[in-house]
Amino acid sequence: MSIYLGKNSKVIVQGITGREGLYHANRMRTYGTNVVGGVTPGKGGQKADEFAVFDTVHGARASTGANTSVIFVPPPFAADAILESADAGIELIICITEGIPVHDMLKVMSVVPKSTRVIGPNCPGIITPGEALAGIMPGHVFSQGRVGLISRSGTLTYEIVDQLTRAGIGQSTCVGIGGDPIIGTVFVDCLHAFERDEKTDAVVLVGEIGGTDEEDAAALIRDKHVTKPVVAFIGGRSAPEGKRMGHAGAIVSGGGGTAKAKIAAFQAVNVPVADSPADIPELVSRSGRQPARV
Amino acid sequence: MRLLEYQGKELFAAAGIPVPTGKVAQSVDEAVAIMRANPKPSVVKAQVLIGGRGKAGGIKFANDERDIVGPATVILGMNIKGEIAKRVWIEQRVDIVKELYLSITVDRQSKRPIIIASAMGGMDIEEVAASHAGAIAKYRIDPAMGYWPFVGRRVAREAGIPKEVTSQFVDILGKLYRLFFDIGAMLVEINPLAITKDGKLIASDAKVDIDDNGLFRHPELEAWKTDLPADALEERARKTGLAYVHLDGDVGIIGNGAGLVMGTLDAVKAAGGEPANFLDVGGGAKADIVREAVNIVTADPKVKSLFINIFGGITRGDEVAKGLVEALGGGSWSKDKLVIRLTGTNEKEGREVLQANGIKSVETMNEGARQAVALAR
């Protein structure tokens, strides 16, 4: 594995008897992910296709040794599902659900232990190409390689990865961190992980308007905690103030969170920022030829 | 969901936060009736969400049922920076000796609610932050701990809140924190939080923004939605579950995935055009959803060309193309003013399907943007 997810990950799906949950459980298994079962309260003991269904995450973990959960439950129940996984000792919790109340996530993040990694919500999941996929990404556009990718967006990630793959640039791990204002894992967390990862040589960071996660990432690079080359893209340069651009977290408010400020923060620490997603493969190849920042 | 001042004050009052006595009016007659029942020196305030209403002439004064007629007539229907004032809030004047600032919002960085307070109230907190950063106190509160009076005392001291009103301040902050959680707010702001001549704190204004994702827990707020200013097309899209944002330009845009659509808008802007909208059809791009999306985007009379940018992932490009052909089949939009960029899985097969049906398709986002901008000229 490179970061967070690999072939030894044992994955359960919360909400496995739902349409989305079961569909993606099958797709993940087809990709090669070790999906060991699923959870739907009240349906324990049943089978969903070939998957064993448990009533609780605690029970599923006891029976299967699962250490990773992918959550597909509707927004009103998603925070409960995240907390249940954390309580049961699941180490990596990936929440796909879009539309979770922000206050639910405030409460979740205030009590989840530091040793538990939450990814999302409102995210496409995570993939370590050739090893495992935990989420809803189209696995076949990814290819094995040594470039890590972190993104707040789904389809834009697929688009960029597709272009990287065509340019012969494979990926170590790609993490969709999600488009909500309060998310479990931010750019800074992933940059730390990629910096430590032997299988990653460079990182593509796909940000967008809203919040200051990109500025925090730039500060981390400035302070030399990241020495591997980073290439960035920021979506929403044309977005007007006060309008939420699809993602709940993609909003410029009170003059803060603009694309301009984020691009400037990266440029100030010599991180090239692509004008268009199409320019990313070229910037990545070029970054490999530049001396690493020391 | 941003609330109007009168709605915010209603929530404040129910939470036990002192607000001036007031009533809302939708017509001059209603305004006159309010003043007849309570002929006291009053402030007449336009109910709009946009800032700067005072400077725009949206705040006036009246003393009785006769001199309310002028201000109410002028303000009702007033266009303030594009927003029409459909209501006025008439409240009794209070003698203010000093203005404070108090708010609670969501701090994304710490993943906690943040209390922001200042003894310099009455102006934009961003302005205060820029000119007098030291005059602002901030406290990120652990939701697991909740609000305790020491938090209020600490914030009051750091913000320089006058000692005489500290105990009132601590009490109001506790009530504001409870309200923040009870309604699932993204922002509750009192600016100004006024100190009156007789030493009482009172909320002179109310700004409340509620998390849309949490609204399902508050059906009681549903009725207020109809009072809020709304864009007709955005409202129509919301009802069909499409993420649509109405903008000013003439290039209509449809794509799948918020990030990809944002990127498409940027590409159109970079090509010298102006996006007419943001519209995310979500994954899969099924025919009926795309058809409704095309209908919404092209219902905007400003739209001169349409750019559809779809990444085929799990749903293969040829299936997406068939969906697009079906959606555009009814002739709802001229193929001459349309550019489609289809990429991802089976993109070649997808493009062949489009070409066979006389629909222009391009390979790159930048080329699509360039052509769509040219078509809008």
Image: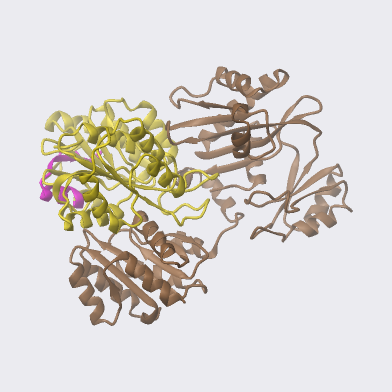
Q: Colour of chain B?
A: brown
**Picture coordinates of residue A258, whole percent (x, y):** 47, 47
Name which quarter of the figure residue B136 lies in. top right
**Picture coordinates of residue A216, whole percent (x, y):** 39, 36
Q: What residue appears at the point 59 percent right and 51 percent down from the top-left corner? A: B224
| Residue B370 visible in the current orientation | yes
Q: Colour of chain A?
A: yellow
| Residue B331 visible in the current orientation | no
Please determine whether, in this image, residue B203 is positioned above or below residue A160.
Answer: above
Q: Is residue B87 left or right of residue A136?
A: right
**Picture coordinates of residue B38, whole percent (x, y):** 84, 44
Name which quarter of the figure residue B205 lies in. top right
Please determine whether, in this image, residue B150 is positioned above or below residue B101.
Answer: above
Q: Is residue B366 left or right of residue B183?
A: left
**Picture coordinates of residue A67, whole percent (x, y):** 18, 32
Q: Which residues are magenta?
A: A23-45
Q: How is the image coloured?
A: by chain
Would you say residue A42 sits in the magenta stretch?
yes
Would you say residue B145 sits in the magenta stretch?
no
Q: Is residue A147 left or right of residue B139?
A: left
Q: What residue appears at the point 80 percent right and 35 percent down from the top-left corner? A: B94
